[in-house]
């Protein structure tokens, strides 16, 4: 198989994976607020139809089927924030980003709960937070939807921005 054919196959697989909601990375996306150091954005989950989080628990409910999990090395970054979209206009709906240093054996908070906007399907950003020293290595990330055990938000995307 010639190298051009191999390259074409790799590009097609990459495009298919991104279109199917698998993690993707953007460098310095539109809307980046950092002028000195560009923000990098990692999409943990993205689906135009979204995923329904039935009775999202107050303690947090991981996106169905662990679809938001991604491995990333955060050793060269200092700040991080979360981004998500919820179908419900309710501050009761939150998102939290957690990390694991032991492949999901235990989890710690990376980005604390941040609420959905007063407008349905709006883009929601958390505040920038410092990446803890314990997370400045190769970590497994996951996103949790935090609710009240009754509401059923549809989550269309979850991203993290970091620099």
Image (tube, helix red, strand yellow):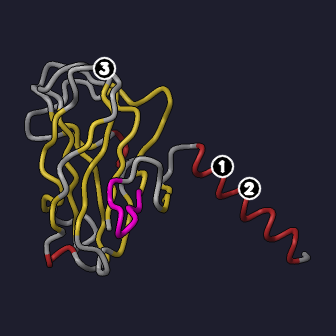
What secondary structure is marked by label 1? Answer: helix
Q: Quadrant of the C terminus?
A: bottom left
Q: Are marks 2 and 1 in contact (CB under 8 Å)?
A: yes
Q: Which residue is depicted at the point 48% across and 26% down?
A: 49
User: Looking at this rendering, what residue extends furthest in the front direction?
Assistant: 35
Q: Which residue is mark 1?
A: 16
Q: CA distance from mark 2 to mark 1?
A: 6 Å
Q: Earlier in the sequence, mark 1 or mark 3?
A: 1
Q: Which mark is residue 12?
A: 2
Instruction: Give the mark nearer the N terminus: 3 vs 2.
Output: 2
Residue 100 vs residue 52: left or right?
Answer: left
**Secondary structure under the numbered disc 2 in the rendered image:** helix
Residue 55 screen position, x and y as percent: 19, 24
Crowd around label 1: few <14 · some 14–19 · many ≥20 (10 Å): few
Q: Quadrant of the N terminus?
A: bottom right
Camera-side residue of 16 and 114: 114
Q: Position of residue 41 (x, y in %)?
A: 41, 57
Q: Which residue is mark 3?
A: 120
Using the image, determine if residue 71 lies above or below residue 56.
below
């Amino acid at each position: 198989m010639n190298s051009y054919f191999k390259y074409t196959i790799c590009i097609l697989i990459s495009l298919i994976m991104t279109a199917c909601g698998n993690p993707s990375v953007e460098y310095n996306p539109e809307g980046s607020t950092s002028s000195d150091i560009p923000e990098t954005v990692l999409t943990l989950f993205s689906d135009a139809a979204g995923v329904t989080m039935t009775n999202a628990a107050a303690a947090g409910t991981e996106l169905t089927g662990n679809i938001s999990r991604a491995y990333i090395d955060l050793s060269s970054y200092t700040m991080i924030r979360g981004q998500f979209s919820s179908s419900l206009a309710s501050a009761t709906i939150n998102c939290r980003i957690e990390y694991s240093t032991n492949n999901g054996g235990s989890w710690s908070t990376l980005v604390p709960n941040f609420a959905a906007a007063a407008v349905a399907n709006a883009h929601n950003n958390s505040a920038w937070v410092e990446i803890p020293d314990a997370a400045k290595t190769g970590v497994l990330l996951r996103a949790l939807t935090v609710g009240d055990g009754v509401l059923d938000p549809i989550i269309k995307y979850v991203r993290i921005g970091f620099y």
